[in-house]
Amino acid sequence: MQLYYMKTKALSITALASVIALSSTMMSCSKKQVAAGSMPAPEIAVITVEPTTTSFETSFPATLKGKTDIDIRPQVTGFITKVHVDEGQHVRKGQPLFTIDQVQFQAAVDQAEANLNSAKSAVSTAEITEQNKRMLLDKNIISETEWQMAANQLAQAKAARAQAEAALTNARKNLSYTTVVAPSDGVVGTIPNREGSLASPSSAQPLTTLSDNSDVYAYFSFNENDLLDFTNGEAGSVEAALKAFPEVELMLANGTRYPIKGRVATVSGVIDNNTGAASARALFDNPQGVLRSGNTGKVIFPRSSDNAIVIPQRATYELQDLRYVYTLNDSNITVPTQITVEPYSDGKVFVVSSGLKPGDRVVVEGVGTQVRQGMKITPKTQAAE
């Protein structure tokens, strides 16, 4: 009997402990549910977009060329005996660049001079003969035919003298060609052939290239959309747009900006069917010779808009090549919104062309990390944005 009482008391204590534990668990869960239900929505920075005046830039890859790039080729064939300049040297118009072996050309001049002297003597003799024959003809001592033969010989001698004079002129010209001079001011390019090399007008490779870099052209291309934007979509207005368009800048290959602004000089009126682009050319002054033919860079066009919607780049994310932002509805719930942006960017903001309207609220904090679709937040206004 006593053993039965002890077992019953132990069972009662165990049951009571189970009830107490279960009650404690239910109370703890209830407290957690209450705490979870009362947790406030996170504060996230939001901006309200409004139209504004903004300035941005468009850049196009460009290749630079001098105002004139002249291939220097010899006009006679011979071996180079002297190179008077070096690569990269600034030269003036008429300055000697190369000397070609002059021996044979000087000999040709000497021979042409001798031939001319001989021809002059023949003319002098023929003139004396013709004068004597005329005197005899006037006295009826000889026939007119005999005088005519003397006159013809004089004409032939004069023709031979003219030929000798032309040959001498040509020989002297060829001799002058042995000194290759600069046809204009410019900068000497690569010199592939040095003393002892054979120079010829038919050689595929020029002696050098002389670049007039006082002005430099930056060649670039517009695609069809850029060209329409450039002309504001108006037919036949390229020339007017060229005159009205502001000055452009040049970004060099190292990321620095050339200090002198330029202007767009020409835009092709034909769009290449293969590339879908129209070629253009911007002109930059180059008084210090900083720019060289063959340099690369970017032509930068200033743009502005009086009614643009601008958002920070960090407020956007991409999904399958489409760009989105999170906007807030009236319940402060995040909603993915697809947008399109202009292809002009300074690395900090985007100019939105479609997808947003004035008054829309856009999340600008935690996009892609903290913020998710359908998430309720507490908007935090950032005036600095």
Image: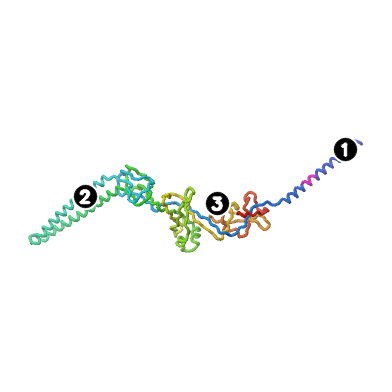
Instruction: Identify the secondary structure beneath mark 1.
Output: helix
Give the number of the mark in front: 2 or 3: 3
Tell me the quadrant of the picture where the N terminus can be found.
top right
Task: Find the distance from the CA under tag 2 to the CA under tag 3.
Answer: 75 Å
Look at the image and say whether residue 152 sits in the magenta stretch.
Answer: no
For the record, the magenta segment spans 24-28
Residue linked to disc 1 = 7
- Other-residue count near label 1 (Cα within 10 Å), few / some / many at <14 / 14–19 / ≥20: few
Query: What residue occupies the far right of the structure in this picture?
Result: 1
For discs 1 and 3, the disc positioned in front in the rendered view:
3
Residue 125: x percent and y percent? 14, 54
* Among the two numbered marks 2 and 3 on one chain, the one whose residue lies closer to the N terminus: 2
Is residue 25 rendered magenta in the image?
yes
The amino acid type found where label 2 is placed reads Glu
Instruction: Return the x and y of residue 268 as percentages of the image width and height.
Output: 44, 58
- Label 1 or label 2, whichever comes before in sequence order: 1
Which numbered dot is residue 347? 3
The residue lying furthest to the bottom in this view is 235
Pointer 2 local density, CA inside 10 Å: few below 14, some 14–19, many at least 20: some
Gap between marks 1 and 2, in whole Å?
149 Å
Query: Which numbered circle lies on residue 113?
Result: 2
In terms of secondary structure, where does tag 3 sit?
loop
- Is most of the magenta stretch helix, strand or loop? helix
